[in-house]
Image: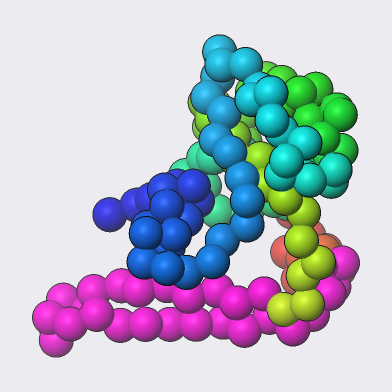
Amino acid sequence: MKLLEFEAKDVFAREGIRIPQGVVVRKGEDLPSNLEEIGDRVVVKAQVDVGGRGKAGGVLMADAGNAGETVQHLFNTPIKGVPVNSVLIEERLPIEHEYYVSIAIDRSKKEPVISRQMCFLPPWMHIIHGILFSPE
């Protein structure tokens, strides 16, 4: 099963896990009038099923006042060839650490396998790492 970020966050919220305030906007819909309630500074995230969407330009920072322009930009910009049909607009939070967790099924053992990567580098270090080790 593959979930988009907003779908996974809905599951987290139902299970009592705190998530940032946010709203999903689908292509053709107007921005909600209460966008300022999310915060003055927001993150606009393309909801596409591709890896590396941030580095591909699918995660953009905006102010609540110009979020509409950012949303339209993402709707008009395919991310790694995939059209953007929905975006998640969230409050911008200060990030101290990033944690990535994935769960896969080990078919031979017939049980879930959890892998995790803990990233304690500042975001700009990931960009430098990508330039040095994946110069495509």
> Residue, x 73% and y 41% (percent of image)?
37
Q: Is residue 10 visible?
A: yes
Q: Which of the 4 quarters of the picture holds residue 42?
A: top right
> Residue, x 63% and y 51% (percent of image)?
21
Query: Viewed as shown, does residue 7 lie left or right of 122?
Result: left
Q: Position of residue 24 (x, y in %)?
A: 55, 35
> Residue, x 71% and y 33% (percent of image)?
35
Whether residue 114 is in magenta: the answer is yes
Which residue is at the front of the view, 1 or 126? Answer: 1
Query: Viewed as shown, does residue 28 lie left or right of 44?
Result: left
For the image, the number of numbered tags is 0
Q: Where is residue 109 in the image (x, y as percent from the top left)?
A: 14, 86
Rendered position, 108 above or below 36: below
Which residue is at the front of the view, 136 or 113? Answer: 113
Magenta region: which residues? 98-126
Provide the major secondary structure of the magenta segment: strand
> Residue, x 48% and y 75% (percent of image)?
101
Which residue is at the front of the view, 49 or 129? Answer: 49
Q: Where is residue 129 in the image (x, y as percent from the top left)?
A: 80, 72
